[in-house]
Amino acid sequence: MIRTTPFHPRLSELDTQRLYTHWQGHLSPRRYTHAPKHEYFAVRNSVGVFDTSPLYKYRVTGPDAERLLATALVRDVRRCRPGQAQYTAWCDERGFVRQDGVVLRHAPDDFLLTAARPCLSWFAAVGEGMRVLVEDVSDAWAMLAVQGPRSRAVLSSLAQETTGLAFFDHAPVTVAGAAVTLSRTGYTGDLGYELLVPADDALDVLDAVLEAGRGHGLRPFGEDALSVLRIEAGLVLVDVEWTDSRLAQTDTERVTPTELGLGWMLGGKDAVHETDRAFVGWEAIRRELREGTTRWRTTGVVVDWQHWDELHRGAGLLPPVVEHPHPYESVLYDAEGEHEVGYTTSFVWSPVLQKHVGLARVRPDLAAPGTPLRQEMALSHHNTSVRVTTTRLPFFAPERKTS
Amino acid sequence: MTVSTGPTHDWDALVVGGGHNGLTHAAYLAKAGLRTLVLEKNELVGGAAITEELRPGFSFTTFSYALSLLRPEIIQELDLVSHGFLPLMMPSSFHPTGDGDYLLLGDDHGQNVQEIRRHSPHDADAYDRYHHDLDQVCRAVQPLFDNIPPDVFGTDPEDQADVAWLLEHLGSVDRRVLHDTVRLLTGSASDWLEDYFEHEAVAGFHASSSIIGSKVGPMSPGSGLVLLFHKLGEHDRHLGSWAFHKGGNGGFTQVLARAATAYGAEIRLGAQVSAVLVDGETATGVVLADGTELRAPVVVSALDPRRTFTELVDPVTLPGDLVDSVRRMRFRGVSAKVNFALDGLPVFPALPDTDDHFGGFLNIGPTIEYVERAFDAAKYGWYSERPFIDAAVQSVVDPDMAPPGKHVMSCFVQYAPYELRGSTWDAEREAFGDRAQAVLESHFPGFGDLVLQREVVTPLDIEQRTGLTEGNIFAGEFLAPQMYFFRPAPGWSQYRTPLRGYYQCGSGTHPGGCVIGSPGRLASHQVLRDLAR
Ligand SMILES: Cc1cc2nc3c(=O)[nH]c(=O)nc-3n(C[C@H](O)[C@H](O)[C@H](O)COP(=O)(O)OP(=O)(O)OC[C@H]3O[C@@H](n4cnc5c(N)ncnc54)[C@H](O)[C@@H]3O)c2cc1C
């Protein structure tokens, strides 16, 4: 049976399309109206809400809670103070990425971890013998992302604490009488917040947010809009950018944190020599860094618009734009179009940047921003390639995101 | 680029007029390294593309308000995104059918077809054919649109090569598409639409872009051309799609001004140019209304052809046939604006609980006949009893345009002929505004109670504030004999003038009006090419 989220009864009233994906066994709207771009621009220009309830949520408590997470997670959770959150990942013993998620620290011995895929037994195994309890609390909490330049104005009318919340901070607040965790997090690369709401209070809180958003152009947005927003934000997606290494068949499907563009999680250049922190996969990652065996770098690619137009016009076509991310990856070639040098995992037209952009993995020697490459493209039933240039990620990072 | 700048030259190039074309042009010249100065008579750049806060918190797009025609190359070449370019797509078109029902079209093709089928099963598949055929015509004319027109009267090898290019291109166009093109360029929108649609309101909806800014009705020959022109816009590469720029079209011209200054151009406000200085057959600078003289080897008029050829320079010094053509050029403005600050969203009785229908244009001109009747009055020097209105509640798409819960509504209203028989626009201003409001009231009962403020912009206001002759929004009507190598006059479609160093880059040059930027861009190619010689 497909499930629905605690927000579904209300959000489905606002949904004129009834077009859903099945996200982790839940109905997840692709769009609420005929115009996903309207929803997209709500996030980039006013404010949008997205139902992220299908995420898995794990509560990690006990005297060894920190030790467990420091052992399991790539980022050093000891640096995460109560009231802060971290975007993080976890690896297998061979230093390949399994999954990513956000960890919120409520107290020295009390954490909440969100994850896109289930992972309880793995964390339990890592914590074997430690004084720690890992519980699946996924169904106890609904989760609402409130994203966009006006998200602060909307939420601060409900909870004053919003105003003081720094990027990746969180705080307990009361909204519509419910005890809510408000965090300055999100998956859009914009100013934004997420509300963790007790499932029973979900509709009351949602109603309060919708009411507060009146006059601010607030609209619910679906996966169509999100799929573009997150690429602009340079945020990677499991099963698109990479495969959980535990479930991959070959090493070519696997990536290390450095290869996935998450090398910064390792904590800087010196971290390779640190010995006091041994998380799962650390040995292999140290070896990778020491021996320089990193196979790929993750980079942005931007299409040369003139070449794109020329190719299409040459084929007698009006140049189109790719409004829905390609559901496949495209091979990258060197500038001469001779050698395969990488692949683009996500590719779409960015309305705010007015460019086709892609998240890509390229040979480390070609990763410097500004490197000219080519990306394969089927055109009129022939394979050709379009000029692209590597560029720093994220593509879109307005000041308001972190200010 | 090096330009000889003797001690007498203050600048490499002077651009007269800081409308969007003057700004675009200046940005290209400055980007190429020319010391460029834009002279704008008003205290704000933008010309017909400005946004004004007439009431605290309410942004009015005084004149033009939506963006579609802007050529995508300009966005890229001038790197406008880094200067704040932000086109907010208008996701829908709403067309009340006059009987309480409506047509609401959006981004979902299948739903649009169903919406049309709801009114007419016949028109459901006609809709696809219609857009396909029109897109094919667009594809055929795009290369003409995006290049400097060949000088068909020229005799040197370069001109002949250009003409050969044109003929070759036309020869490559499919026969039927070429025929469709000529039908559109010369015929009426209603004739063209009759081939596809049987339902009055469906045809009426598609005819709405055929009369914008032009003294034609949808049944007049020539309205097909206006329809085609408006289909050539391609926001995010959807032909005929529209957006609101962040902050209105004034927000857009501010982006252009930032880009131009970032490339090194200077903009001087409150600087009215009274004449171009001429030495023999060469332009040498300009003189401002306050007597200031500025010298430059290149002077570019971004004004309309009347002003470029008969006001900024003494027409006696120009070839008689050119002056004659410019005097015969038609500028008969018929458009007005009625802008509102509203206390809340208007209510369309059949759609009480949603604002989806306010995501884009709101067309009030239910049928071709309705619009044609609105046109009738204009033929005889009077404004429409029941005008056609092309409106948008911009604050739905961009909430920053009005305070929370309040709205601004921009209404482009026709027909309002520049010259009234037996009265003046200053006398008729509010009576005209009342008529527009009465039409809105009939579709949105209770509309009047929402009105906090109303601004009526007459063709005379347009002329006085922007300098667009007779208030013609395109700086010269879109009539076949005033387009392409005849725009603005036979033999003078390549942005040059008979005076050396004097150029033109306003909407009166190819390809024409709208917030499109091409005249400014293509003229810069010409100026830079000439300088390189
Ligand atoms: C009411 C109205 C609604 C419209 N709606 C739309 C729309 O929604 N979408 C669209 O695409 N197009 C629309 N248009 C058309 C479009 O706005 C114009 O075609 C376009 O803006 C003209 O640009 P321009 O730069 O060529 O000329 P202008 O914008 O007219 O610029 C000329 C500039 O020159 C200045 N100037 C004049 N004389 C002098 C002088 N002697 N010295 C110095 N400066 C001088 C003026 O002040 C002005 O700033 C509309 C036009 C009007 C009037």
Image (spheres, helix red, strand yellow):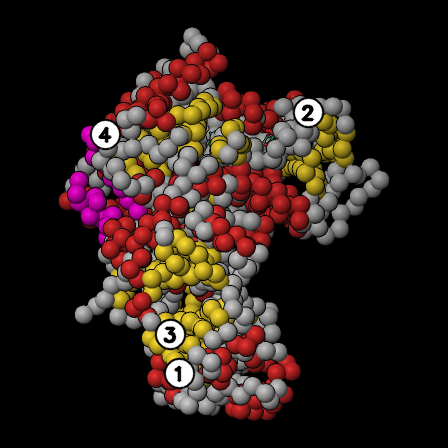
Which residue is tagged 2? B274
Q: What's the chain of the residue with tag 3?
A: A
Mark 4 vs mark 3, CA separation in Å:
57 Å
Residue B98, disc: 4
In the image, what residue type sits under mark 4? Gly
Between the C-alphas of marks 1 and 4, the distance is: 64 Å
Picture coordinates of residue B154, whole percent (x, y): 56, 41
Q: Chain of mark 4?
A: B
**Which residue: 47% across, 80% down?**
A63
Find out whether the residues at labels 3 and 2 contact each other: C-beta distance under 8 Å.
Answer: no
Mark 1 and mark 3 in contact? Answer it, CB < 8 Å: yes
Spatial distance from mark 2 to mark 4, Cα to Cα? 49 Å
In the image, residue B177 sits, relative to residue B60, either above or below, namely below
- On the same chain, marks 3 and 2? The answer is no
- Mark in the foreground, 2 or 4: 4
* Residue topped by disc 1: A123
Residue type at numbered disc 1: Phe
User: Looking at the image, is A281 positioned above or below residue B101?
Assistant: below
Circle 3: residue type: Tyr
As drawn, B515 above or below B31: above
Q: Which residue is mark 3?
A: A58
First along the sequence among labels 1 and 3: 3
B105 drawn magenta = yes
Mark 2 chain: B
Q: Is residue B289 magenta?
A: no
* Element carrying mark 4: loop
Q: Who is closer to the viewer here, B47 or B170?
A: B47
Q: Secondary structure at mark 1?
A: helix
Mark 1 vs 4: CB contact within 8 A: no
Q: Is residue A373 visible?
A: no
Q: In this rendering, which labeled residue sits more in front, label 4 or label 3?
A: 3
| Mark 1 lies within 8 Å of ligand 1 (Cβ measured) | no
